[in-house]
Amino acid sequence: MHGHSTEVHAQIRQIINYYMEYNFRAIEKKWQARWVDTKAYQVSNDSPKPKCYVLDMFPYPSGAGLHVGHPLGYISSDIYARYKRLKGFNVLHPMGWDAFGLPAEQYALETGQHPAVTTANNLAAFRRQLDNIGFSFDWEREVKTSDPGYYKWTQWIFLQLFNSWFNRSLQKAERIETLIAAFEKSGNKEYECPGDRSISFTAEEWKQFSEARQREILMHYRLAFLAFAEVNWCAALGTVLANDEVVNGVSERGGFPVVKKKMRQWFLRITEYANRLLEGLDTVAYSDAMKEMQRNWIGKSQGAEVTFAVDGVAGSAVTVYTTRPDTIFGVDFMVLAPEHDLVSQITTEAQKAEVEKYLDYVQSRSERERMAEVKQITGCFTGAYVLNPFNGRRIPVWISEYVLAGYGTGAIMAVPCGDQRDFSFAKHFNIPITNIIGEAFNGEEANPTKDATLQHSDFLDGMTMRAAMDVVADKIEEMGIGKRQINYKMRDSGFSRQRYWGEPFPIVYKNGIPYALDEKELPVTLPHVENYKPGEEGEGPLANITDWVNIDTDTKRETNTMPGYAGSSWYFLRYADPKNTEEFAGRAATDYWNQVDVYVGGTEHAVGHLLYSRMWTKALYDLGYIGFQEPYKKLINQGMIGGNTRLVYRIRGTNTFVSHGLKDQYETDELRTDVNIVDGVELDIAAFKKWKPDFNDAEFVLENGKYICGVVLEKMSKSKFNTVNPDDVVEKFGADTFRMYEMFLGPVEQSKPWDTKGIEGVHRFLKKLWRLFADEQKGIIVKDAPATPEELKILHKTIQKIDADTENFSYNTAVSQFMICVNELSSLKCNKRSVLEPVLILLAPYAPHIAEELWHQLGNTTSILDAPYPVFEEKYTKESAFNYPIAVNGKTRTELSFALDADNESIEKEVLTNDAIQRWMEGKPVKKVVIVKGRMINVVV
RNA sequence: GCGGGUGUGGUGAAAUUGGUAGACACGCCAGACUUAGGAUCUGGUGCUUCACGGCAUGUAGGUUCGAGUCCUAUCACCCGCACCA
């Protein structure tokens, strides 16, 4: 009987221990399941609460899975979303998939597996990894860009862009019908053609045009338009390559030659939005660095276009764009882009052969090379001269690859004394240099100043350059030889990809003329293909499916697909109303959720995704579909988590490894080893031997009985064996520990290396927190006794700090504060409900599982997810006295305590009579006593 | 070259925005408990000095009673853009 009872007791103790120890695995599994069952994260579009929209940049589900760097942003947004919910907001916090993309197609080419299959697999793996971490995503709103129910609306938005144009005088997009009406009324004289400035016609002419011609003209105005552009064509692979697939003029795979080839492609006329994209930056909270990157990308510049007549060729003229019209008298030569239309017209017989040779050379150069080799100066004289309109001086015309056809007018006036590239060019080709800025030019290098005084400049002599700019611009306009001009270096964005795994275009060609499909015909679903080989002449794989392409004898489908950024440009709108089959999103839903309040993601999307997404939002706004024109109110860029590579040292020519501290005694080779088999810097030798067959019989030279590894910080990547899978960390320490540790590493925006070793501190903190509530033997030990002032002070200081830090995304300092709080409550042995319960609520956004578990252990029956957030009350933290540091001449010498309401005179008196202070004053006379209330006191002698 | 950012212990980092530099952790050292410890707890830990003290926030100046914080110059590293006229 007695023995039996002991056994039962042991069993009971085991059961109690199971619950009363911090058993994070059981707790996390339990609550994750419970939250799913109770649909705890489902959010409604109908709520009396204020809304808050917290969004992560959705991932491309790659085959490699998540490493510990990826969830950093997701954890911060999750904390914020949970925090806002506790603060009484209706929070939208969705997640989805950027599921179209090149890697899936590459993988399909290599393995024959359909991208839809591999994407679904990857996606499931990502989902499992994410679920492990305990995010509060509302998965009912999941979107997937490759889902026809989603891309139907991507195609629909494309049609809106195709069917609209940008009205420059109103600075907004309008439907194409308004433009047609204007043409019928007064031709295009009010609306300069953005695609081709030379197009000009009257209403009568418009009406005479054939339908083909009319549509051709409209194409030059549409926001989504067709144009010819060069692509990287690799004949050997029979495909078009992306810029980064081309290295030194040959394909990255196989090393086959790549040439530029003109293809008809879709573009988005984002340049029309340049100014609004620029000005919109003032209305959003992005980091300065981010705004600056976008400004640079847009690249607004103010200047003038000036036309120079070609000497001896009647009716021929070169128009240049310059930001420095003030330097007009310093022009020593002219440079055209090699691709410039005038080159063939103005080249003289004598120079013809040489120019052609140069053009051949340029043709052989990839865009990359032209950009990379900055130092090399090349060019060729055309034999032609233009005349300076102000003084009739004959100016030689050159061509050179440093002038780009796509920017400005594709021609520049070269002023060697003021522009370094022009200077180098003049020196290289021995072109005489005119100095218009006197001593400011030293003859050794150009001086781009705007503050020098002009000389040899006719009517500008004696004027500062800055002042001359407007004078010249006025004169140019007055003489009718040019005008002021604003340019942007941003280009219209290419929107065609010669690929399979993307959205098909809702476009058909009838006798070669492109027509939009009717909305009713959407979605144009991506047909199933058996192979992913490119079509002939570089078309995408869709071109091979002839019965899909050929609708009838003279009607063919567009065979290109849309690029990756198509689906991601508007996904934030779809989350508001993800299941709508009638519209991309209902107006009531987008009006309610409105702008994304906080958008979290990496800097790598600084320009591409953000600018396109901003443009689409503006276009949808202009056309009246949504009520706001900036998608993301506030942007947080999470830093990268770097890899922390571990190195081992093999003695050359042996299979013996020597510990880091002893490696200098041998000649060694450095090898990377798997960071996951190293504890801190100590190698797990058994695991290392098993890691690779080569090391099965490795031998080791140890220091102090351990093998110590070297450390190097680099990018986290599989090939460097330094990736850490969040699954492994969660398995070992739990999701709550993982979440808090990622935040504890440092500021969210900052890049920092991952070090698994440090996680133990956070794990210990959670265990210590647990012990405030539960004792292994006694179970829950929380009491209902009243809190002491000391305990309340700790609690309220914590409320104040956590509340502010969470709102400001300062999560690393918040975690510190939790640690301080738990440390202090532990040393006070505080087990009081009135103190511990509010701490749990504060903690819930950071460590939701343990918070929910303890919340229920305390007898609460509703979820902590909707508990009332504690309110800070100053009266508990107010101090009556302060322990002042007392400094003499700025050096702290002692400390004295004074009441905060003590008057300065009595403080001063006491300080000056203090022994320690007396000693440091060394009898010198007091000049001044600085007393800063509640901070410090400084005696100046 | 242009633009943005960062430099603080052996390590990740704090610092109420001009007021006790190094909070909170990791690591390390010493100790307690334990059959054991990679559990838990306690104490210590910027450098220097026997000590009093002195020196310390990339470097050099400046402003100030007082500077990690503001100003000037300079160096290093990271990110973005780039023959952009």
Image (cartoon, rainbow, N blue to C red):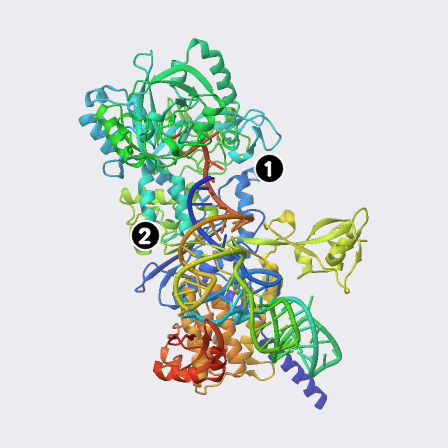
In this rendering, position of residue A644 left or right of residue A222: right
Measured as percent of width and height from the top left, residue A800 is found at 40, 72
Residue A159 seen: no
**Dot 1 alpha-carbon crowd within 10 angstroms: few under 14, some 14 to 19, many 20 or more:** few
Residue A695 seen: yes
Q: Secondary structure under badge 2?
A: helix
Hey, which quadrant is residue A112 in on the image? Answer: top right
Q: Chain of mark 1?
A: A
Up the image or down, A88 lies above or below A577; here it is: below
Q: Secondary structure under badge 1?
A: loop
**Dot 2 alpha-carbon crowd within 10 angstroms: few under 14, some 14 to 19, many 20 or more:** many
Distance Cα–Cα, label 1 vs label 2: 41 Å
Hey, which quadrant is residue A707 in on the image? Answer: bottom right
Measured as percent of width and height from the top left, residue A360 is found at 51, 18
Along the line of sight, the residue nearer the viewer: B38 or A668: A668
Measured as percent of width and height from the top left, residue B33 is found at 69, 83
Looking at the rendered image, the quarter that the N terminus of chain A falls into is: bottom right
Label tally:
2
The residue indicated by pointer 2 is: A590
- The disc placed on residue A392 is none
In this rendering, position of residue A629 left or right of residue A77: left
Along the line of sight, the residue nearer the viewer: A760 or A405: A405
Lower position in the chain sequence, tag 1 or tag 2 = 1
Measured as percent of width and height from the top left, residue A347 is found at 41, 13
Along the line of sight, the residue nearer the viewer: A331 or A706: A331
Q: Chain of mark 2?
A: A
Instruction: Report the amino acid beneath label 1.
Output: Gly
For the view shown, which residue lies furthest in the bottom direction? Answer: A2
- The disc placed on residue A112 is 1
